[in-house]
Every structure is written in C-alpha cells, then in structure tokens.
Image (spheres, rainbow, N blue to C red):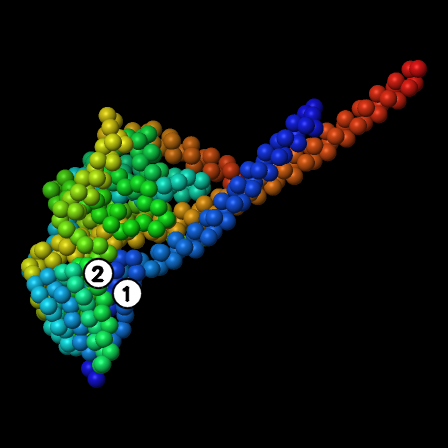
Amino acid sequence: MNTIKINIVSSSEEIYSGEATMVFATGSLGELGIAPGHTPLLTGLAAGPVRVQNGSDEETFFCSGGFLEVQPDLVTVLSDTAERAESLDESEAIKAKEVAEQELANKDTTIDYAKASAQLAEAVARLKTIQKLRKKQ
Amino acid sequence: MANTKEVRKQIASIKSTQKITSAMEMVAASKMKKTQDTMLEGRPYSLKIKDVISHVALANSEYPHPFYEERAPKKACFIVVSSDKGLCGGLNINLFKQVILKSAELNQQEIGSCFALIGTKASSFFKSVGGEVIAVAEKLGDKPNPDDLIGLTKVVLDMHKNNDIDQAYLCSNSFVNTMTQQPNVDQLIPLAPEEQSEAAPSQWDYIYEPEAKELLDGLLTRYIESLVYQAVIENNACEQAAKMIAMKNATDNAGDLIKELELLYNNVRQAAITQELSEIVGGASAV
C-alpha cells in the first residue's frame, strides 16, 4: 500500500515517527486529510487532534497548535507545547522587559569595555593560576 | 610553631568542606545525565524545523522574509545564555569574554550593542559592567520550559521588526564532551541562507494556508525560539559537566591539603614531645 512518512515533534520531545496511509489534522482554516503524494503545503495548525492512519490501525495525538508541512512523501508536524495566543506572547515579552528594567534600573547603558575586560581578565587569571597550581603538584 | 589543637581544627574544617564538594560532584554527575537526555530529546524538533526551513528556502516563495535580509548594521543584540548558579569553573567567564570581545569589535565599527540575558550569572555580570539590557529571563531550572523563553525572544524579534536592531547573535556554550565546553557567538539574524542545491530547481511553491507572510512569520519565529531553547538546554548540560569537574578538582585539592596538614600535625606533635622530654631531662640533671 502507498504510504507517506510522518513525523510529529514538539520542542521538548519526539512524539511520533512512522508511516501512514492517511493523516488527518486540524488546520487553521479547517480539517485536512493528507494522502501520499499530496502537493506541497504549509499551514498553521489549530488546537485539535492529529490522526494517523496506517491501514486499519489508527493513532490519535492531541496538538495544541503549531505548523504542518507536507511534501509529496513526507508530513512534518511541528507541535507547540502550549497554546499560543498573540496576547499571551505579548504579556510574556512585557514580563521579560520588566525583569530587565528592575534588575538594571538607573544604570549606565553604555558598556565600560575597559572595566569589563579588566574584570574578565582577573577572573581568567585566577582560573589559570588554579590550573597551574594543580599541574605543579 | 602552630599548636596541635589549631591544626586539628583546620583539618576537621577542610574535611567537612571536602564532604560538601564531593556531594556536589555527585549531584552534578547525576544531573549531567538528565540534562544531556533533555538536550537529546529537544534535538528532533530543531532538526525537523531546520528541514522545513530549508524546504521553504528552496521553494520559490513570493514573500522574502525580513530575517534573511542583510541590512546595514547599526545595532546588534546579543542573546547571552548563562547558568543560574556559580561553582562551575570558567564556563560563564569564558563565554562573557567572547561576548565582550565581539561587542567591542562591533563597537569599533560603530555598531551598537544591546543584550538579552538568560541566567542569573549573565544579569549580575552585565549589572556590574554596564550595557543596555533589553530583556532578562532567570531561574529557568534544570528542565527549562520552552514557554519561559518566548517573552525574551519576542522582545528581540520585535526590536528587529521595528528596525531597532539589525543583527542578533546567540551566545552560549556548546557541549563537546564532559571535559570540554566551547563558548560560541553565532549569528542568529540575518539567518544564513541555505545553500541552494543544484539538483532541486526551485520551480515549485507551497500552497500556503492562510497567507504566506503570516505563516512564514510564525514559522521563522518558532525556528528562532527553537534555536534559543536548544542553546539553553545545551548550556545546562555544559553547566552540570563543568560543575562536576570543578567540584572534583575541589575535592582533590581538599585531599591534598589534608595530607599536608596531617604531616604538619605530626611534626608539631613530635616537636612538642621532644621538647617535653628535653625539659624533663634538663630538670632531672639540674636536681
């Protein structure tokens, strides 16, 4: 039987890898059914199940969003680990900025390269000395 | 001459330090295994998204993405990945050195720098030397969640979108083996274009659902996020390996110190006995 390769991955793990006769997914514009030899397609995924059929076997995975790429002989599902919304991303970004501002309030924003190099040189020298001491023994 | 009690006290204190460092060594060794596993688990995603990105680059897309665009650089952003905790040898210091060198080099070409910092060590370093810090992500733990990095990455990408920065560098340690960690400063934006292979003529394009622009924006953002996440988990593995080595060295050093002090202790004890004897002999002959 004609099959198509399918890989489902999320950023923290590989979820599924194998062959399928048919793949169903929830695209951002609606349900998709992908058979072997499908034309190249790139689409966003909405939260929903991804069903992988291989003959009479069927496996279902939940996907909270992400991307789906179709090549004639290959389907790749890049799943997000969590639901992503523009507003959520925005609030995360604001949080990261706030931490930066709190940490470094009222501070000079130009780097004192001389000071930085001196500090680093001192630290490196200290480490080198330790190494030398060890070698001597 | 030091007295025996003092030396004994010193030996006891070094022994207890040695116990701590050897315990920390063992903790780091077991954590190293875990962080390495996490690093490997994250790899399939970054490989797959790279595949997809290279397919996209091959496709005859109608929409060239700004991340590929070479702009005359005026300002660069460094995403610096460091550890949250210290006691890991020169791991962070070596990385900061590379970052400062690169930043100074850009400064000479009149390209400004700003920094997005991951890890407590980086933020405390830049607190002391200065530098424009645009975002900070701290205390991500041993198993960082990709979602914890979204905010920081977004700040950087937004600045790129608004033309506030023209380049972005990802600075982190790469894991060579347990003994060796390599500090790297890699260019993140503009993305290096994939090599066009001759065999695959770019005659085709994807069907995009919905719009190409929207999709590629999302996809490339995920790609950058995945690179940053991968750097963070790899840096974690580096941290544990470096910590294990540092603590092993500390334990060995403590052992050497104890040996020396025990020798000193025996000398002092012997000297005390000899002195006492000679005093007794001297006293007896005086009678």
Task: Judge the density around disc 1: few (<14), some (14-19), many (≥20) Cα neighbours within 10 Å.
Answer: some
Q: Position of residue B34 (x, y in %)?
A: 41, 55
Residue B124 in picture, x, y percent from top left:
33, 34
Tell me: B210 left or right of B180.
left
Query: What element does badge 1 sit on?
Result: strand
Which chain is mark 2 on? Answer: A
Chain at numbered mark 1: A
Query: On the rendered image, what quadrant is the C terminus of chain A found in?
Result: top right
Residue A111: tell me if it is visible.
no
Residue depicted at x 21% and y 64%? A62
Callout 1 amino acid = Ile
The residue labelled by disc 1 is A15
On screen, residue A30 above or below B113 = below
Q: Nearer the viewer, residue A47 or B138?
A: A47
User: Mark 2 — residue?
Assistant: A79
Q: Residue B136 is drawn in which quadrant?
A: top left
Q: Residue at x 60, y 38 (%)?
A: B15
* Above/below status of B169 relative to B40: above
Could you tell whether B190 is left or right of A133 in the image? left
Q: Is residue B204 visible?
A: yes
